[in-house]
Amino acid sequence: MLGTVLGIGGFVAIVGLSQTAAGQIGSTFNRLDATQVTVADTAAGKASVPTLDFPRDADALVDQIHGVIAAGVWWNVTFKSAVVSARPAASGSSQLGLPVTATTPGALTASGAILAAGTLFSQFHESRAQQVAVIGAAAASQLGISDLADQPAIFIQGQPFTVIGIISADARIPQLNFGVSVPASTALRLWGRPPPSAAAQMIIHTRLGAAQVVARQVPVALRPDDPHLLTATAPASPAQLQHSVTASLNTLFLALAGIAVIVGMIGIANTTLVAVLERVSEIGLRRALGARPVHIAVQFLAESTSLGLFGGLIGASVGVLAVLAVTIDHHWTALLDPRLVLAAPAAGALIGLLAGLYPALRAGTVEPADALRR
Amino acid sequence: MTTASAEPPVIRLAGLSYTYPGPPPVPALRAMDLVVRRGEHVAITGPSGSGKSTLLNLVGLLDRPTEGTIEVDGLDVGAAPERRRAAVRARRIGFVFQSFHLLPHRTAVENVMLAQIYADVPRRRRYSAALAALAQVGLDHRADALPTALSGGERQRVAIARALVNHPSLLLCDEPTGNLDSVTTGELSGLLAALHREGATLLVITHNPAVAERAQRRVTIRDGMLAEQAGTAGAAPGGGSPAGGPGAPACRRLACAGRPRRPGCPCATWAVRRWPGCSSARVAPP
């Protein structure tokens, strides 16, 4: 019975833990990466001259794809020296080396920018190539800007920009947290296309589970004439991840649990066989009282089956407790298929039944005359 | 004896033989004939190895004869299929064993109820019937005691209640007092005699002359053959013990049964050791 307890317990614990672990990995991925698709301008990265393969209406084109929440193009604008200052015509010492990023309004939304003050730029700023900027909270304090009420201005390479918003946090484009971002059309007008070393890319925020589908559609939607210019990258599917984790855990540990179950089965068979031998006189008595061999066999089968059933019940409980202990220790969410927990005692009973077959046969063939002499 | 001639005897053995398979084959019973009628109290005595146990196994349908027929209540069961023999065991034969054979973890009343399982007694009637059987042997006040808490005599009375509970045609007792002291043996043989007076048919295999003498008929088995010993088959139920006493011819024959042909048999010494009754007045008729 101990073997059955260990076997069934191990079985439930292993399956439960692998389910839990897989679910845990899945939920980590679901939160951020599983909803993000990035589209790289691979052709521009290999080109010798500054190129931009995203069409001007890229945001609107991708927004039409089902499953897309927000999408936008962005690139790093590179300068040879530090160029940002809070005052016009500043000398070298007051120029700050802040990163400047060209973003479409969609990119700001898709990257998950959270505003501390003001507003993000809109389609109006983009279409008119307005000289406006959204700056990170760190950049704002470096530039001495704390209040947007009087429309403060900053200068990039001497060009004035009106600061319309301050970002407190951005989840997906870290430069925005401590740099300056300007509308993509403004950057194009003032500084031209992005160089191959800093090619443009697109960030897409999708609904949960839509990332893979969206990634397949985006290059065609943006450049139906030549989809190979762009490469869309989606995160590994959580389902695939779960599967691989479960599979690797399962093959190893299920084999161990299977061995434990077999050991338990041998244990029950042994216990029942010993019981048959020990209770030969009881068998003789029952035969003398009118029991047929089939009655005796069924009695011992019932005993071994209930032994297996109890082993399965205790094993299932131990397994569930083990899963709970591990998940509580790791602050995970326990994940266990209720069908598995219900099936475990039944499996134990079946093991007991199989283990009892031979002893029951032996019990049925005991000769009552011999048995009573003991 | 009030047995109607139309009624078949409880037991009829005809030409019954049993040979233990070899090698070499050992003949245990040779062409034995015996009739036990309803209401009789028959004692079978004989030395060890004379074939008593073999006879008990055959009459109790635990074994099949090599030759001959066994009839229980007129049913030929010697060659019947096992299913029918099991049913006859359950309903028509009540076993009482030397070593009691009680289940140690079951109470007295549960042990009695065990016999009803295989006789297909409806579940709700079992308890009251088992209690009634215990009352018959005067043990209903210990119904919920475990066998370990009972004395040897009480255990054997539980076993007798178990044998009685299905109202069998025959009570088959194998050395019922073999594990009991002399006082308890007296009580138990008194109980068997009382059951006989109430109409039970008893076949008692025993070594103990005190028990054998309570029987109406005494049959000796020796080298696989039967010999009617004392008393008469026609005696009334409860007709008292046959004549006997210290040195009585019947007693002496009984005492030396199995050894008479050996020259120089130390009969007196042996009889004193094995048959304490022979040298005391305790077996004298009341």
Image (cartoon, rainbow, N blue to C red):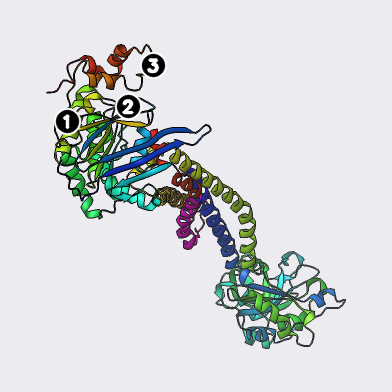
* Chain letter of the residue beneath label 2 in the structure image: B
The residue identified by callout 2 is: B46
Q: Quadrant of the N terminus of chain B?
A: top left
Which residue range is magenta in the image? A327-354
Whichever of labels 2 and 3 marks the residue nearer the N terminus, that label is 2
Q: Nearer the viewer, mark 2 or mark 3?
A: 3
Are labels 1 and 2 on one chain? yes
Image coordinates for residue A107, horizontal then vertical, percent: 65, 77
Whether residue A339 appears in magenta in the rendering, the answer is yes
Q: Is residue A250 left or right of residue A44?
A: left
* Chain letter of the residue beneath label 1 in the structure image: B
Q: Residues within 10 Å of mark 2 (few under 14, many from 20)?
A: many
Q: Give the structural element (helix, strand or loop) at label 3.
A: loop
Q: Is residue A173 left or right of residue A8?
A: right
The residue identified by callout 1 is: B190
Q: Residue furthest left?
A: B286
The image shows residue A316, relative to residue B133, as above or below, that is below
Residue at the location (17% across, 30% down)?
A: B190
Numbered label tally? 3
The residue identified by callout 3 is: B262
